Image (tube, rainbow, N blue to C red):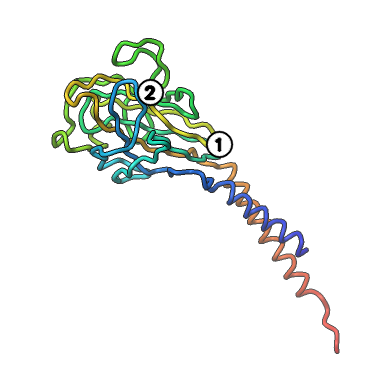
């Protein structure tokens, strides 16, 4: 019986380990990250941008952005999601920038805007007229429009609510995913430099949680049976 208890306990621990991110991950869910952009057609980086403030998070409230992690100076966020998830990208500070996002080296798959807001991502023609581009955020509106507070302010919530600011939501398949991106735009006001912010959310894991709960229930039942048998055993005089 003790062996059975240990096996059930080991199964529960293993399930908990599956739900935990891999050590190689450098980003987490429900956390905003700030990236930086310089020249049209170049990779997104992390640097001395305006950052990001007032970003919506789940189930409610707001948070500021942290500097996006990089690999060799290039923006590169890695996260493990057993059931998959999605990520939301937005231009901040000043309108006019657009992004082509990649997951594991391939153009990201667009999806409808999620609960955090933003515009519709798509595959098509980008803001500089290139056709057949996959994994694009929405077309920006008025070039150089500010959200609030002028050029030094990067209010994420304000940007997501303003259609002049390019944004989009993309699919993250189950497993370990790496997010990168390319700047698409011709920002005349700052010569092509600017900021972007992104956040990752996971799809709930009902099957894994149910299995984990079943393991815990089995462990509890095994312990109760063992105690019941011990209490029912006749005592012998020494």
Residue 100's tag is 2
Q: Quadrant of residue 142?
A: top left
| Residue at the far left in the pictured view | 150
Total of numbered circles in the picture? 2
Horizontally, residue 1 falls left or right of residue 58, namely right
Q: Secondary structure at mark 1?
A: strand
Q: Which mark is residue 175?
A: 1
Q: Is residue 169 left or right of residue 208?
A: left
Report how far apart the C-alphas of labels 2 and 1 lie in the structure.
22 Å
Q: Position of residue 19 (x, y in %)?
A: 55, 47
Front in this rendered view, residue 130 or 14: 130
7, 20: nearer the viewer: 20
Side of 6 where 153 appears, left or right: left
User: Local crowd at mark 1 within 10 Å, few (<14), some, or many (≥20)?
Assistant: some
Residue 46 in which image quadrant:
top left
Q: Please tell me which residue is depicted at 75% across the width and 64% down the height of the picture.
A: 2
Q: Position of residue 59 (x, y in %)?
A: 37, 44
Give me the residue at 25% from left, 19% from top: 186
Single out the residue that lies furthest toward the front: 72
Q: Is residue 226 above or below residue 155?
A: below
- Residue 232: image x %, image y %? 79, 74
Q: Is residue 71 above or below residue 101?
A: below
**In x, y percent, where is residue 8?**
70, 56
Quadrant holding the N terminus: bottom right
Residue drawn at the location 37% of the way across and 21% of the way down: 136
Quadrant in which the C terminus appears: bottom right
Q: Earlier in the sequence, mark 2 or mark 1?
A: 2
């Amino acid at each position: 019986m003790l062996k059975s208890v240990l096996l059930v306990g080991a199964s529960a621990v293993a399930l908990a380990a599956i739900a935990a991110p891999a050590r190689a991950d450098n980003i987490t869910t429900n956390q905003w990250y700030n990236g930086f952009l310089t020249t049209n057609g170049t990779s997104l980086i992390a640097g001395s941008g305006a950052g990001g403030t007032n970003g919506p998070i789940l189930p409610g409230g707001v948070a500021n952005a942290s500097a996006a992690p990089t690999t060799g100076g290039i923006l590169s966020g890695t996260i493990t999601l057993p059931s998959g998830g999605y990520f939301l990208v937005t231009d901040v500070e000043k309108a006019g920038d657009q992004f082509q996002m990649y997951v594991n080296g391939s153009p990201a798959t667009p999806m409808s805007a999620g609960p955090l807001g933003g515009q519709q991502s798509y595959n098509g023609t980008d803001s500089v007229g290139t056709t057949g581009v996959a994994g694009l955020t929405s077309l920006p509106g008025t070039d150089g429009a500010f959200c609030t507070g002028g050029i030094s302010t990067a209010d994420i919530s304000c940007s997501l609510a303003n259609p002049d600011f390019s944004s989009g939501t993309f699919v993250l398949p189950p497993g370990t995913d790496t997010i990168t991106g390319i700047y698409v735009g011709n920002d005349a006001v700052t010569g092509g430099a600017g900021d972007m912010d992104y956040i990752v959310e996971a799809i709930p894991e009902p099957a894994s949680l149910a299995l984990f709960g079943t393991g815990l229930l089995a462990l509890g039942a095994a312990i109760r049976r063992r105690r019941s048998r011990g209490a029912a055993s006749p005592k012998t005089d020494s």
